Amino acid sequence: MIHPTAIVHDSARLGEGVRVGPFSVIGPQVEIGDGCEIGSHVVISRNTRMGRGNRVFQFASVGEDPQDKKYGGEETWLEIGDHNVIREYATLNRGTVQDGGLTRVGSHNLLMAYTHVAHDCRIGDHTILANAASLGGHVQVHDWAILGGFTLVHQFTRVGAHSFAAMGSAIGKDVPPYVMVGGQPAAPRGINQEGLRRRGFTSEEIGAIKRAYRRLYRSGLRLEEALEEIREMARELAVLEVMARFLENPARSIVR
C-alpha cells in the first residue's frame, strides 16, 4: 500500500487500506484515516489529521506552514474530514495561533486543481472550489457553497451556505446564504435557484428565499430593516433562519 519510494515519518499514523504513491512525503504528527488514497509526489507536511476515504491527487501540498509573517514556528494544525477530493497542485495551510491554531475542512468537498486554502480557514461540507479558487486567511465557506474557477475571497470573509460565485469573482464582503454573486468586485445576481432545486428545496422554500432576497437587495431598506423583516419571515419558514442568523453578525458587511 506504501510505495517504496515514499517517505513516511515514524510518528505518522496511517489507517487501514491507506495507499501512498511514489515519491510522496508524509511528515510528522500526520494522521490519515482508513481508505485514503494519496497520489504520487504529494507532500503532507506535518500536524495534519485526515479522516476516512479522502483522495489526494499528485503534487498537492497539504498541511504546510501558514503563509503569514506572524507565524513563528508554533504548533498549529490542519483538520480534514471524510470523503474529500483534493486535486492536483492544491495547497492547504495550517492555522496560526492568532486564530486558534487550526485550519479545518469538513467532509464531501471537492477542491479542484490549484485551489488554495489559507491559514485559519473553515470550510463546511459538500462545497466545491473550482480550479484556482483561492481563499485568504480566516475565510469561512459554509455548507454547499460553490466557488467558480479563479474566484478570489478576501481574508476574514464569509461565504454563506448554498451560495454560488461565478467564475473570476472577487469577493471582498460576506456573501449571504442562497445568493449568487459575480464580478470584480462581486455583486449580487439573484439567488442560486438551480442549486436549490437540485438539493431538494421545495417551490415554497425557494419562493420564500426569493422574497427574502428582494427585501435584502431591491426594497431600498437598510440592512438592519431588511434583517428584521427576514426574521419575521423565518418564523413561518425555517429555511430563512440560516439567512437571518448569517446577517446578524456580518464580518465585513455584505455584498451589495
Image: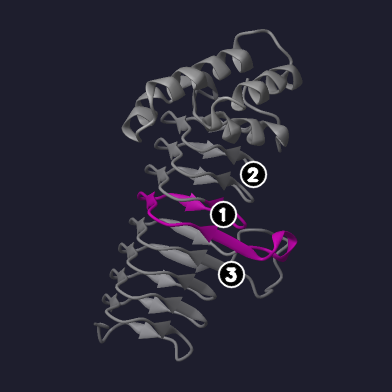
Q: Secondary structure at mark 1?
A: loop
Q: Which residue is mark 3?
A: 77
**Camera-nearest residue between 86 and 32:** 32
Quarter of the image where one finds residue 65: bottom right
Q: Residue furthest front?
A: 236
Q: In the image, which disc is placed on residue 118?
A: 1
Vertical position of residue 13 compared to residue 192: above or below? below
Q: Nearer the viewer, mark 2 or mark 3?
A: 3
Identify which residue is drawn at 35% across, 50% down. 113
Quarter of the image where one finds residue 203: top left
**Camera-nearest residue between 148 and 224:** 224
Mark 2 residue crowding within 10 angstroms, few (<14) / some (14–19) / many (20+): many
Quarter of the image where one finds residue 243: top right
Q: Are marks 2 and 1 in contact (CB under 8 Å)?
A: yes
**Camera-nearest residue between 151 and 17:** 17
Q: Secondary structure at mark 2?
A: loop
Q: Is residue 40 found left or right of 44 in the rendered image?
A: left
